[in-house]
Amino acid sequence: MTYCVAIKLNAGLVFLSDSRTNAGLDQISSFRKMMVYENTGDRFMVLLSAGNLSISQSVREILQVTKLPCAEEGGEALTIWNATSMFDVARVLGAAVRRIYDRDGESLQRAGVDFNVSLILGGQIKGEGMRLFQVYSAGNFIEATAETPYFQVGESKYGKPVLDRVITPTTPLDEAAKCALVSMDSTLKSNLSVGLPLDLVVYEVDQFASERIVCIDEHNPYFRMLHESWGERLRQVFDSIEDPAWNGRATEVPLRVDPIRSQHLKKITSPDEKLI
C-alpha cells in the first residue's frame, strides 16, 4: 500500500509520498512514488502515484512521450513539455492512463487483477497560476479548490484529521510541510503497509524550480524529533481534558436487554406475538 498527499496553498505547493509497496507479508519492497518534471524557468510539475505498481510505472514511463492531437488542424500535438496549462498536462496524463488500460486492461482482468491506479498531479507552467489535480483509473480528473486545497491517495484515513484541522489556502509553506509530515507520521504509526523513506517537495509560487526536494529516512533528525514530539504532545493534550462526568441522567438511553427478556425473545415463533 502507500500514502501520498499534495497541498495547494497561496504560497506554493507541498508534495509528500512514502516508498513502501507490498504483495503480501513476505514481499515488501521500496519503490519511489514521486516523479518531478522540471524545465527551469518554464514549468515545474510533480506526479504522485498509488495503486498497482506495474500500472503506475507504465503510466510514468509513457507519460513523457504521450501526445494529444491539437485542436487546430496542423497544430503541434500536446505533450507535458509544450502544454500551456496544467489542465492540458492533466489531459495528457489521463490519455496515458487510458493508453495503458487499452494495452493491459483485458489481460489484467483475465488474471483477476483490477486496473487500479490513483495519481496526483500538481505544478505550475509559466503564464498561469499553480494547479493541483487528482487523476483516476479511468483517466478523468478533478481539480483542487480553495475549499478542498489538498488531495490524498492510498491509505488516506489516518492522516486526514490533522490536514482538515490545519490546512487552509493561507497556511505558510513550512507549516504546511510540517502538517504533511505529521499526517504521514500518523499513517506510519497506524498502518504497517506505509513506510520510510519519504520523498518531500516544497515548491514556492512562480519559481518554476525547487531546491527543497528531500528524501527522509529513519535517521533524519527533524522527522525523528517530529515523531517523538507529536506523540508526547498528543498525550499531554489528552491528559489535560477532563474525564466524562456521570452524575446526570440522559433524556434517552440505549435499549437494555436483561437475561429474562433475552430468553423471551428466543421463544418467539410468530411475528404477530407481542412483547410486553
Image (tube, helix red, strand yellow):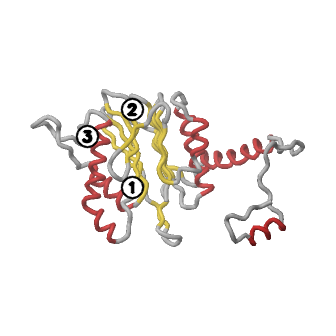
- The spot of residue 130 in percent (x, y) is 39, 32
Tell me the distance, in whole angstroms, between the alpha carbons under discs 1 and 2: 24 Å
What's the residue type where badge 3 is placed?
Answer: Trp
| Left or right for 6, reference 95 | right
Residue at horizontal 61%, vertical 41%? Answer: 162
What's the residue type where badge 2 is placed?
Answer: Met
Which residue has dot 3 on it? 81
Residue at horizontal 21%, vertical 46%? Answer: 67
Q: Earlier in the sequence, mark 2 or mark 3?
A: 3
Which residue has dot 2 on it? 130
Which of label 1 and label 2 is nearer to you? 1
Q: Earlier in the sequence, mark 3 or mark 1?
A: 3
Give 271 or 113, whichever is nearer the viewer.
271
Furthest residue to the right?
Answer: 247
Which of label 3 and label 1 is nearer to you? 1
User: Neighbour class for label 3 at 10 Å: few (<14), some, many (≥20)?
Assistant: some
- The spot of residue 59 in percent (x, y) is 31, 54
What's the residue type where badge 1 is placed?
Answer: Val
The answer to whether one can see residue 97 in this image is yes
Q: Is residue 82 above or below residue 153?
A: above
Residue at horizontal 28%, vertical 65%? Answer: 106
Which residue has dot 1 on it? 117
- Residue 110 in which image quadrant: bottom left
User: Neighbour class for label 2 at 10 Å: few (<14), some, many (≥20)?
Assistant: many
**Secondary structure under the numbered disc 2 in the rendered image:** loop
- Residue 134 in which image quadrant: top left
